[in-house]
Image: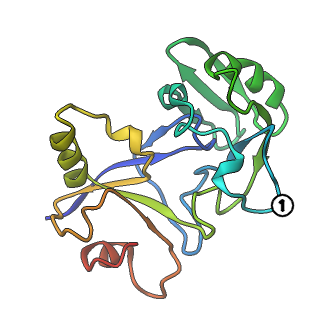
Amino acid sequence: MMEVTALWRHPMKAHGREALEQVTLVAGQAMPFDRMWAVAHDNAQIDGPGWQKCANFTRGASIPALMAIEGHLNEVTEQLTLHHPDLPDLTFHPDTEAAQFIDWIKPLLPSHRAQPERILRLNSRGFTDTAFPSLSLCNVASHHAIETLADTPLQQERWRGNIWFDGHEDAEIARGTASFALTRGDTSLLEAMTKGKAS
């Protein structure tokens, strides 16, 4: 029997994961507050308002030290608290206190990489990796398969997923992280997962 095993959001893209006990999803939108902010670097090619490609942002794929950041968002005040094992905790508002964050994060960034310059905000859909509002789905079976191939234990959090599920062995589903747009008519998330329609 398939079940959801974990829920995660990342209020600031690539800068802090947050575990959730429950979440309410809305058709046509990403997970609430997920990747609502993103950190544009000094080589970014921002082409107007709205969604931007992930190459414009500082990310864990190119800066592994960012992967250790944990976060907690106060949804009322929009104060974001970040924790990294090598830094003191930081609580700030991404819209008004970006300079504090940039000073805080700089010790983690290699000097040869693009440096953080400003924080962008995108309500409702967030700066997901897709050009459409999406969720990132992760299969526990896929994670275990990768651990077996790598012959080493791995943290699930490294995949930056939103919803983890277990109990589905279908090869089409067991590909790791999948993106699912909540714009598929009356097809429910569970139906899409069980019928192999996640892509």
Residue at figure coordinates x 70%, y 33% from the top left = 79
Q: How is the image coloured?
A: rainbow
Q: Could you tell me if residue 36 is visible in this image?
A: no
Q: Could you tell me if residue 145 is visible in this image?
A: yes
Asked whether, in this view, residue 100 is left or right of residue 142, the answer is right
Q: Secondary structure at mark 1?
A: loop
Q: Nearer the viewer, residue 9 or 53?
A: 53
Q: Is residue 103 above or below residue 31?
A: above
Residue at figure coordinates x 82%, y 29% from the top left = 97
Quarter holding the N terminus is: bottom left
Q: Is residue 141 above or below residue 186?
A: above
Q: Quadrant of residue 156?
A: top left
Q: Is residue 156 above or below residue 183?
A: above
Q: Which residue is mark 1?
A: 47
Residue type at numbered disc 1:
Asp
Residue 182 appears at what percent x and percent y?
50, 74
Residue 44 appears at what percent x and percent y?
78, 46
Quarter holding the C terminus is: bottom left
Asked whether, in this view, residue 30 is left or right of residue 1, the answer is right
Residue at figure coordinates x 26%, y 80% from the top left = 195
Residue 173 appears at what percent x and percent y?
27, 67
Residue placed furthest toward the bottom: 185
Asked whether, in this view, residue 125 is left or right of residue 122, the answer is left
Residue placed furthest toward the front: 112
Q: Nearer the viewer, residue 127 or 82?
A: 127
Tally of numbered tags: 1
Residue 83 appears at what percent x and percent y?
55, 22
Residue at figure coordinates x 18%, y 69% from the top left = 170
Asked whether, in this view, residue 130 is left or right of residue 119, the answer is left
